[in-house]
Structure formats: C-alpha cells, structure tokens
C-alpha cells in the first residue's frame, strides 16, 4: 500500500504521525511510504532520516495526498487537507467528530473511510490509541495549570505544593482515566491537596493509592459545587468514547471560584466538559471567563512533539500494519471496525448517530 504522512497544519502542531524508524519498518514490509517534505522537523526528525530508510519525500501536500492511498496523520484534517482528500482515501488519525459537525459533513461529502484513533476500542473497552496522548495531556494540564496560577500570568499567585508555614494548593480533577489520573498523580506529587471525582470504584481506589493528600469522591452535584468553589486548579478529563463530552461544571460553579483560579479542559476536543469552555490553540491558549483563567487548547500534546510523536507512533504502528495489509483483511478486526467513524458518505460510529449537521 502507498502510505502518505502529511505535515500537520493545525496551529503550532509539531507532531508527526510516523517517526523514521516506524516508517522504515513499513518500507521493509513492502509498503511505499511517502512523507511530506519537512513533516518531521518539529518533532526532531529531518527528511534524511526518513530517506535513508527508503521513505520517499513529496515536495508539498498536494503531491503527498496524490500519492497516498492511506493517509496517516495526527490531528483531524482542516481546510487545506480537506481540499486534497479523496473518496478512495483511507484516513487514519484523531477525528473527534462529535464536536465538529462541519468537519463531519465535509468528510461525508468526500465519501472517504475515516478511522479515528480515539475510537479504536478493544474488547475490554480500552482505547489503546488515545491512551498515550491522554497521559501526556493530563500531565501537561497540571504543569500548565501550575504556571497559570503564577501572578504574572494573571493567576492568584499561589504555589500548588505550598511549604512550611503556608497552606497547600487545592486541585480538583474530574475523571480518573488516563488523563485525569496523570493530572492527579503530578498534582499529588507536587504536594497539593487533590480531590478526584470519579464514578468507578476501582478508579477511586487507584486514586487514593497516589497518597494521603488525594481524596476520591462520587460526583454528587452539591459536593462538586463545594469542592470546586475552594479549588485553585480544576482539570476536566471526562470521556464518553466517540461522543460529545458531558458538562460537569456549570457557569454558576465557575463563577463561584476565586478570581485568578484556573481551569484546564482536556475534554475540549470532544466539545469540552465545562459550560464556559471554548476551543483555543497554542498561539492564544487562554481566556478569562467569570474571573477564572480557562485553558482549552484542543491539541495539548502538540506542545511536546518529540515526546508525543514517539509515543503515538509506538501506539499506532501495529494498527497501521493491519490497515495496510492486502485488501479488506483489516475489517475482520473488531477494534478497527469500532474505529470507523464515517464511510461512503454515511456516519458509522453509533456515538455520532443523530448529530446535527
């Protein structure tokens, strides 16, 4: 199969879907791999590292999309990409269509097969292609939130861990999956008092084991409002596979926080889990609503492309191999079938049925 890896076009997105070693492995399997010129540079990989492993270089996006049968990228296609995608393309990337009706409509018009990283699902419900980026996003949420609490950044001027003779900061995390768990772990290690809201008892137990400064609670409405009101940093990491994220915080709850507090919405690429959330990018990452700093960047792991590209590539390569196998053999794989979001002009994934286009 001819596999095309384009340069990412989202604002300040530095990741590349396939690192040189992975692309080289695909070449050894008999595939023809094309890389758009310079696509790996922001991740620390120059074109020569690819070409010496047998990868071919396309001079621009138009040439890359023309060559590729399967397009493997990181983030969802945007304007420039959409002009180059064709009906016969197999698109394999993060799509997050539940929050993107316009993109969904365009992909349906094109008629291609779109397999989304975030909905490739194993029998036990695990999302293997979402997990590594979730961990990175969760870690970044606490790192960025800590920085935004600094007074020069408009924050309340509080150090999360505190020290002798000062109070500890307080972090509230919604969701104890890969992203929320990573946020809570880093905040706890920094010395903050951490409250994690979760509905699954096994995950509550896991959060408690992070340390005596971590409390895991069921998200009763009044309890949520009380805990959020006294929080310095709130991280939203709720997930319903393939579907739009539910709101766990109302505007009223946000307004009840102290001025200069910070909220980070990791779920923003699925529509956001706070009522006051709206998408931002790394060029203009924050805004203030109800006196609270909001960080709602839709491609958080793109800020650390060297780490993120290596992590996502290691996760997706076995699945790229399956998709690139001859014919439609990959359709016998239940996890990949769940990954199909759109095909032949129709919505396939059940979480997207009924969305307004």
Image (cartoon, rainbow, N blue to C red):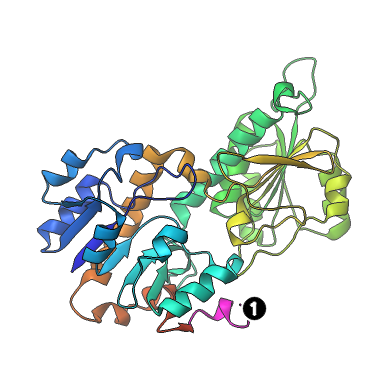
- State the residue in front, 129 or 122: 129
Residue 17 location (% of width, % of height): 33, 52
- State the residue in front, 145 or 113: 113
- State the residue in front, 258 or 110: 110
Magenta span: helix, strand or loop, mainly? loop
Q: Specify whether 50 is left or right of 162.
A: left
Is 353 included in the stretch rendered in magenta? yes
For residue 194, above or below residue 326: above
Tell me the residue that label 1 is attached to. Answer: 356
For residue 298, above or below residue 44: below
SS label for mark 1? loop
Residue 110 location (% of width, % of height): 41, 77
Residue 185 location (% of width, % of height): 59, 40
**Residue at 34% over, 73% down:** 86
Residue 123 location (% of width, % of height): 44, 74
In which quadrant is the N terminus drawn? bottom left
Residue 319 in view, yes or no: no
**Residue at 28% over, 43% down:** 38
Q: Extreme top residue here?
A: 165
**Residue at 57% over, 76% down:** 351
Q: Which residues are magenta?
A: 347-357
- State the residue in front, 66 or 75: 66
């Amino acid at each position: 199969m001819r596999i095309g890896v384009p340069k990412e076009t989202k604002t300040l997105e530095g990741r590349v879907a396939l690192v040189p070693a992975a692309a080289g492995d695909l070449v050894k399997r008999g595939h023809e791999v094309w890389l758009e010129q310079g696509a790996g540079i922001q991740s620390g990989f120059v074109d020569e590292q690819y070409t010496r492993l047998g990868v071919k270089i396309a001079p621009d996006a138009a040439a890359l999309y023309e060559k590729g049968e399967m397009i493997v990228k990181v983030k969802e296609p945007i304007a420039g990409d959409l002009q180059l995608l064709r009906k016969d393309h197999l698109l394999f990337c993060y799509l997050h269509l539940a929050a993107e009706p316009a993109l969904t409509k365009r992909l349906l018009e094109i008629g291609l097969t779109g397999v989304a990283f975030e909905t490739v699902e194993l029998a036990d419900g695990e999302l293997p292609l979402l997990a590594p980026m979730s961990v990175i996003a969760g870690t970044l949420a606490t790192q960025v939130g800590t920085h935004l609490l600094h007074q020069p950044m408009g924050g309340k001027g509080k150090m999360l861990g505190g020290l002798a003779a000062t109070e500890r900061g307080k972090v509230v995390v919604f969701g104890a999956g890969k992203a929320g768990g990573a946020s809570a772990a880093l905040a706890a290690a920094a010395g903050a008092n951490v409250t994690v809201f979760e509905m699954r008892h096994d995950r509550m137990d896991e959060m408690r084991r992070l340390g005596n400064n971590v409390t895991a609670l069921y998200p009763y409405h009044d309890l949520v409002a009380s805990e959020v009101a006294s929080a310095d940093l709130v991280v939203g990491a709720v997930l319903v596979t393939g579907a739009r994220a539910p709101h766990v915080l109302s505007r009223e709850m946000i307004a009840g926080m102290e001025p200069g507090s910070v909220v980070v919405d990791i779920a923003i690429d699925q529509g956001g889990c706070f009522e006051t959330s709206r998408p931002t990018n790394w060029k203009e990452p924050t805004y203030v609503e109800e006196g609270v700093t909001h960080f709602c960047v839709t491609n958080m792991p793109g800020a650390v492309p060297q780490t993120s590209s290596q992590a996502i590539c290691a996760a997706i390569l076995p699945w790229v191999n399956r998709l690139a196998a001859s014919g439609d053999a990959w359709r016998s794989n239940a996890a990949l079938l769940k990954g199909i979001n759109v095909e032949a002009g129709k919505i396939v994934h059940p979480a997207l049925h009924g969305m307004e286009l």
